[in-house]
Each structure stands twice: as structure tokens, then as C-alpha cells.
Amino acid sequence: MPDEREYILGTDKPELERLEFQHQVWVAELYALAARAGVRAGDTLLDLGCGPGFTSFELATIVGRTGKVIARDASERFLGHLREQARARSLPQLEASHGRVEELELGEGSLDAVYARWLFCWLPDPGAALARVARMLRPGGALLVQDYLDWGAMKLLPASSVFDRGVLACLQSWKDGGSAINVQELLPGLAAAHGLRVESFQTRSRLGAVGSLEWRWLEEFFLSYLAKLVEQQRYSAADFEAWRAEWSLRSRERTSWCLAPTVADLVLRKL
Ligand SMILES: C[S@@+](CC[C@H](N)C(=O)[O-])C[C@H]1O[C@@H](n2cnc3c(N)ncnc32)[C@H](O)[C@@H]1O
């Protein structure tokens, strides 16, 4: 049975709330990508690595009651939230599927589309997962991926060595954990081997001033993840203290900006 501790960012309540806020920051991009890929009412979709379900609720709204969304995640805790909200929001077309994506068995050609946001970047073998979902797509079906192209592109402006050290500590922790955070560097190149064609590939670079959605998104992420790295002795308490002091000074002065990690939106079409 998958373990809650396997997911590097955790599955506790603060992480669930962070994912909910993150979803609000990025929800417009979800709708834009779904529209570009032609996802519509009546479709059968898989939401891969759905987490607590914030993406799944939107996808279930797009496909409507004549469609279906299968939401797959390794965290039973996150799926508990998804089931409860699916009932509260009257979304009977949304079905939870518990387990690792690497072990998912669905009929060959049974899906109109697969959607994955910030899932492939955490997988030890993204190519194997790509091969598996490619088989599940019907000819003409689409795989929609919203994920990192360059996480380390992030910057605090004016530049800050304290901030940059925090970025490096995060990158090192993911490397040590065996995941390729900049997974959008890999996926387009793997498509052809699995009978998929790159239909569109676009970057999303976002710059935000103090207090913007981007600013708050990065703040929530770093406060939570750097604290975890301190507990794991991968980042010093002194560096974390310096990070917080720098961020709070920048937040008060209101003369800074942050460049968010570069995300890319990818549509792969099954031949
Ligand atoms: C950053 S969250 C993204 C959640 C959701 N896609 C979103 O954008 O809000 C990553 C999710 O992937 C799940 N996950 C990570 N590795 C997984 C695996 N091998 N199999 C299934 N789920 C996995 C985690 O449990 C977590 O819910």
C-alpha cells in the first residue's frame, strides 16, 4: 500500500491548504490548456496525481455529468478530501482511485484525455508513467501536462544570495530524492516512442510584485518546505532565519519582485 510519507512535500493539512491556494494561482492555466486540447462535455478523463482534488473538481465541471473523471493519487488522506468534496459539490462523475500511478491498470484506449499537473516532476521514472498512460489513451486522445520546465529560474529581484541559497537547497533535496524536477525538459522528447505527437508546448513565466499571487505562492512554498529541510538537516536553521528576515524586509519595503519557476504546458496527441 502506498505510504503517505512517500510524497516529498507531505500530505498534512498545511500542505493541503497550500495546494488549495496554489490551485487558485494556476486555475486559469488549467482551463486554457483544457480548451486548447479540446476537452469537452461527455469525455472520460484521468487526473493523474490529483492530490486533494482541486484540479479534479474543475475537470469534472468541464466534462459534466455525461462524462467521467477518474482521480488517481497515492495519498488516501488527499483522496478522503476529494471524496468528501465531490459529494458536497454534487459531482457524481468524479471517482477516486487510490494507488501509485505506476500501478494503475485501465483498459487500453479507454480514455479521451489524461491530465497531470505537478505529478511527473516527482516521479523517479517519468518515462515509464508516460508509456503507461499513452496505452490508456484512445487514438486522437490527449495527454495534458502542466509541470516545471525550469524550477531554478526563480529569482528575487533585486537579487538576493540568501534567497538563492534556499532555491539551491530545494533543488539539491529533489536531486537526492531521485526526481527530475524540470521534467518538461524530458517529456516532449519521449513522446514519439510512445505513439504520441507534440501538439503544443508553451512556457508560462510569471513575475509578481510584493503581495501578488506569485509572491504569496512562493512565500507559502518556502516557509513550509524550508522548515522541512531544516528538520531533515539539509538546510541550516541560521539560513532559514536569514531567509525569513530577508523575505519579511522585502515584503515591508514593497520594492521587490519575484520571478516564479518556469512552468510549461504540453499537449501530446495519441496517433
Ligand atoms: C504537487 S501535488 C499536485 C496535486 C494536483 N495535481 C494539483 O496540481 O493540485 C503532487 C501529487 O502527486 C501525488 N503523487 C506523487 N507521486 C505519486 C505516485 N507515484 N503515484 C501517485 N500519486 C503520486 C502526491 O500524493 C500529490 O498528491
Image (cartoon, helix red, strand yellow):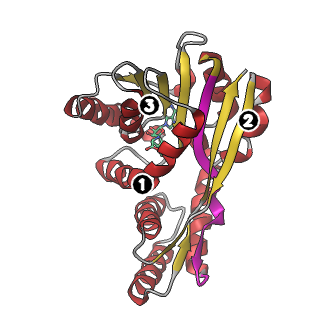
Between disc 2 and disc 1, whose residue precedes? 1
**Vertical relation: 11 (above or below) 74:** below
80 up-or-down from 169: above or below: above
Is-magenta flag for residue 202?
no
Q: For the residues marked 2 and 1, what is the alpha-carbon distance in whole angstroms? A: 27 Å
Instruction: Confirm whether residue 125 shows in the render.
Output: no
Front disc: 2 or 3: 2
* Quadrant in which the N terminus appears: top left
Q: Secondary structure at mark 2?
A: strand
> Label 2 is placed on what type of residue?
Val
Stretch of the chain drawn in magenta: 141-159
Mark 3 and ligand 1: say if the CB distance to the nearest ligand atom is below 8 Å. Answer: yes
Instruction: Select label 2 or label 1 by which is in front.
Output: 2
Which numbered tag is attached to residue 73? 3
Instruction: Please name the residue that numbered disc 2 is placed on.
Output: 198
What residue lies at 52% left-to-right and 37% top-to-bottom?
34
How far apart marks 2 and 3 lie (CA) works out to 26 Å
Q: Is residue 108 above or below residue 4?
A: above
Please indicate whether residue 148 sits to the left or right of residue 215 in the image: right
Q: Residue furthest left?
A: 88
- Residue beneath disc 1: 22
